[in-house]
Image (cartoon, rainbow, N blue to C red):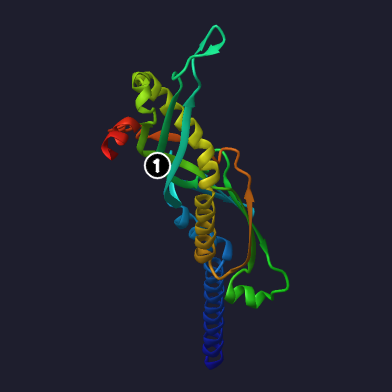
């Protein structure tokens, strides 16, 4: 009788011990899944890019693609002024220049440029690779150790807002009859917008660099500790200076050169 009870107790103890071990194994596996570096990185990247992007992942490759028209991420803004002199050569009569028929204007254009990222045509891709030489227990309790290679298109000028455009007639007092017409001014304004693209391509490079630095710094900050080396490859962006203008209102000058001379006298 006692031997039967002892046997039953041993069986129950064995079952309990086996159950306890099974629970521990399940908990350890669950903990290992939670500590999985790729999953933590996936969540961190999703939060960083926000709801404006769709993040997909499979076999160690994570793709981030923009799903909104404008992505407000790591943007940089700056105000610039572009100045240039406009001149129309003298009219010709039978091949001979007509005296006092040339026109000149001093032009200035103040605008705000905004740079950032457009991931609609070119997606941002993360490629994770496990770090070798880490024991099973280290991976179990410390999580997977990963290196990541990120390929992302370089930033671009997203928009340019024209603040003030001034066209000042520089005709002298002797050419008062040859002042700029409304047609001249609108033609000069169109030329100024065309020229400003080249101006932005030179002056706006600092904004592209700033946006690039902001995104790289942000990524390195949000990636979890499980991610070791972060290698960022910046892809050339052929649309870096393809942008739309807004606020194309320009201000007519209050006075021309002849009026300035009169005031000086």
Decide if residue 128 is on the left or right side of residue 220. right
Question: Which residue occupies the foreground of this view, 155 or 148?
Answer: 155
10 Å neighbourhood of mark 1: few (<14), some, or many (≥20)? many
Q: Which residue is mark 1?
A: 111
Quadrant in the rendering for residue 127:
bottom right
Where is residue 83? Give x, y as percent: 45, 40
Relative vertical location of residue 125 with respect to residue 84 in this rendering, above or below: below
Q: Position of residue 156 (x, y in %)?
A: 52, 44
Task: Say which quadrant the C terminus sits in.
Answer: top left
**Residue 183, image x and y in percent?**
38, 19
Q: Residue at x 63, y 73 (%)?
A: 139
Can residue 180 be spotted in the picture?
no
Q: In which image quadrant can residue 111 be found?
A: top left
Snapshot quadrant of residue 254: top left
Q: Percent x, y for residue 18?
A: 56, 78
Please tell me whether residue 183 is drawn above or below residue 24 in the rendered image.
Answer: above
Residue extending furthest top?
94
- Vertical arrangement, residue 206 with respect to residue 257, above or below: below
Residue 175 appears in the figure: yes
């Amino acid at each position: 009788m006692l031997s039967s009870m002892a046997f039953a107790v041993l069986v129950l103890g064995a079952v309990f011990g086996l159950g306890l071990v099974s629970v521990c194994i399940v908990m350890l596996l669950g903990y290992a899944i939670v500590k999985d570096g790729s999953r933590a990185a996936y969540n961190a990247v999703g939060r960083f890019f926000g709801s404006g992007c769709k993040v997909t992942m499979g076999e160690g490759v994570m793709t981030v693609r923009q799903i909104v028209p404008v992505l407000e991420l790591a943007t940089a803004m700056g105000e610039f002024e572009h100045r240039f002199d406009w001149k129309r050569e003298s009219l010709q009569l039978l091949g001979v220049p007509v005296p006092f028929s040339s026109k000149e204007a001093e032009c200035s254009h103040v605008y705000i440029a905004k740079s950032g990222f457009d991931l609609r045509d070119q997606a941002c891709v993360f490629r994770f690779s496990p770090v070798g030489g880490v024991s099973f227990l280290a991976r179990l309790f410390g999580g997977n150790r990963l290196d990541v290679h990120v390929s992302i298109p370089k930033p671009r000028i997203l928009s340019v807002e024209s603040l003030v455009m001034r066209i000042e007639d520089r005709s002298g007092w002797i050419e008062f009859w040859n002042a700029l017409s409304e047609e001249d001014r609108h033609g000069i304004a169109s030329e100024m917008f065309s020229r400003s693209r080249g101006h932005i391509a030179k002056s706006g490079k600092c904004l592209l660099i700033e946006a690039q630095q902001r995104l790289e710094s942000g990524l390195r900050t949000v990636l979890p500790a499980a991610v070791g080396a972060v290698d960022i490859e910046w892809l050339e962006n052929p649309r870096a200076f393809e942008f739309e203008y807004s606020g194309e209102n320009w201000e007519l000058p209050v006075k021309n050169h002849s009026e300035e001379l009169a005031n000086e006298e």
